Image: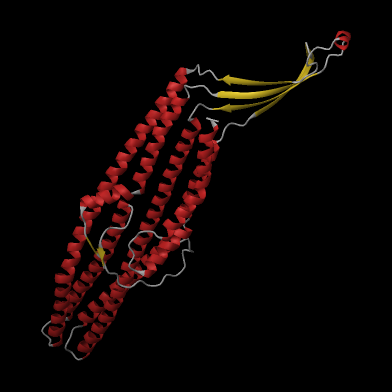
């Protein structure tokens, strides 16, 4: 029983794992931590988590690794044997004709438990990789959404620009008709309108491509329509590098997977060392004995004449191939070294990603502030001044078009910085494995 009881407990624990892990997966999917101030974006993310095939594939792979636990925890199948004597073995109590045996092998103490621990650690690592894939899909959906939002804003701004230029064209034509303006001004305005129309065509093509990418992430038909996205706001966040490193070290799924694999490696070394110890086989055999029918036995039957035999046996394997077992230990040790290096590499990559995105966010925040407080007001004021001078005849159409073009570029760049800021926040979320701390919308 010293062999069976630990195994029974661990097997029962392992068999209980799939339901527990599925519940954890459902809870994690229902309460994903990610920043999404827009209800449409949150719905897109949850839809992607529900239907994305790459996530489903890793979930299935995780469930498969869980099913390995009861397999490695189980004892080897017992062996049932039958032997028929071709020539009976004569004994004092009669000939032996048939033997029925049953034997069971037991690995050395603790071997089955270690096998289960190794399998459970591997299952835990695949679960972390499954969650990492969820985070990756979240990041991709959000990045596509923010890029799509920029294109929608750029289309709106360009449409406003086109309407404004058409108004300027009418003014230029009216001036030309009355002899107060030049035909060149009309032609130049029409050329600017053509440029804006060309830009709109390019933007609509980009929107079609971005919508197809987002639909693909949502497992929708690529051509399915997506509602236009309104202007996005950006949150204020505190970007403390040391705090972000600590959060990432705790939550980044690749790091947790690497830690689980290190634990698996340590248990694997212990398991390899068990190979130096023998396996135990316990058996029982029933021997059918025929009674003696000879004259002497008939006149004076021996005690227990024809009584069947029941015997017990115990056997040990002999682990002679010591170098093979040493090689197994060395192999497990090298795998452990590799897993520890993988953890170090993942941590270095995480810290680089965090620092890179923090620098990018700080830069983008300064640029957004510069555009909002300086460049946009200046460009708008310059256009108003140019329009006033144009109406009084102090400036011509070309000056008006220059001011309008400057404002257009500033507005487009401002929207681009907004989208880039949100994409950088998305990348920061991906780097730390959870939502970024202390947001104020």
Q: Nearer the viewer, residue 416 or 399?
A: 416
Residue 175 placement (x, y as % from top left): 20, 88
Residue 290 placement (x, y as % from top left): 81, 18
Q: Residue at x 16, y 67 (%)?
A: 370
Tell me, yes or no, if residue 83 can be seen here: no
Q: Residue furthest bottom?
A: 178
Tell me, yes or no, if residue 262 can be seen here: yes
Q: What colouring does the structure picture have?
A: secondary structure
Q: Nearer the viewer, residue 73 or 233?
A: 73
138 above or below 39?
Answer: above
Does residue 214 appear left or right of residue 420 in this picture?
A: right
The quarter of the picture where residue 265 lies is top left
Does residue 183 appear left or right of residue 333 in this picture?
A: left
314 above or below 334?
Answer: above
Q: Residue at x 33, y 54 (%)?
A: 430
Q: Nearer the viewer, residue 70 or 355?
A: 70
Does residue 136 appear left or right of residue 423 in this picture?
A: right
3 above or below 410?
Answer: above
């Amino acid at each position: 029983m010293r062999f069976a009881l630990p195994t029974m407990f661990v097997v029962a624990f392992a068999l209980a794992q799939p339901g527990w892990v599925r519940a954890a997966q459902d809870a994690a999917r229902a309460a994903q931590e990610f920043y999404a101030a827009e209800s449409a974006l949150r719905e897109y993310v949850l839809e992607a988590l529900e239907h994305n095939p790459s996530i489903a594939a890793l979930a299935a792979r995780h469930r498969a690794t869980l099913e390995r636990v009861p397999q490695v925890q189980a004892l080897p199948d017992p062996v049932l044997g039958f032997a028929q004597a071709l020539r009976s073995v004569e004994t004092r109590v009669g000939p032996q004709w048939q033997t029925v045996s049953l034997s069971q092998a037991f690995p050395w103490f603790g071997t089955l438990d270690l096998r289960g621990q190794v399998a459970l650690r591997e299952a835990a690592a695949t679960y972390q990789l499954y969650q990492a894939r969820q985070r990756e899909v979240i990041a991709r959906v959000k990045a596509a959404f923010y890029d799509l939002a920029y294109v929608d804003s750029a289309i709106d701004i360009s449409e406003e620009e086109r309407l404004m230029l058409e108004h300027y064209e009418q003014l230029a034509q009216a001036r030309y008709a009355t002899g107060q303006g030049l035909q060149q001004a009309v032609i130049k305005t029409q050329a600017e309108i053509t440029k804006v129309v060309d830009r709109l065509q390019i933007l609509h093509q980009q929107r079609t491509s971005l919508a197809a990418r987002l639909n693909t992430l949502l497992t929708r038909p690529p051509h399915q329509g997506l509602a236009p996205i309104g202007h996005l706001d950006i949150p204020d966040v505190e970007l403390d590098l040391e705090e972000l490193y600590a959060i990432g070290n705790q939550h980044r799924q690749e790091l947790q997977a690497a830690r689980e694999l290190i634990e698996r490696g340590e248990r694997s070394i212990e398991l390899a060392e068990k190979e130096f110890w023998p396996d135990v086989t316990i058996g029982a055999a029933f021997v059918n004995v025929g009674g003696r029918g000879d004259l002497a036995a008939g006149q004076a039957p021996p005690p227990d004449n024809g009584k069947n035999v029941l015997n017990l046996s115990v056997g040990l394997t002999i682990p002679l191939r010591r170098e093979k077992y040493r090689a197994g230990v060395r192999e497990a040790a090298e795998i452990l070294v590799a897993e520890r290096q993988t953890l170090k590499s993942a941590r270095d990559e995480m810290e680089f990603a965090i620092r890179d995105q923090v620098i990018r966010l700080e830069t983008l925040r300064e640029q957004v502030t510069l555009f909002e407080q300086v460049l946009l007001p200046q460009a708008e004021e310059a256009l108003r001044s140019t329009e006033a001078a144009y109406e009084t005849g102090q400036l011509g159409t070309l000056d008006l078009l220059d001011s309008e073009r400057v404002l257009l570029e500033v507005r487009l760049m401002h929207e681009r910085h907004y989208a880039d800021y949100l994409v950088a926040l998305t990348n920061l979320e991906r780097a730390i494995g959870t939502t970024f701390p202390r947001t104020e919308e």
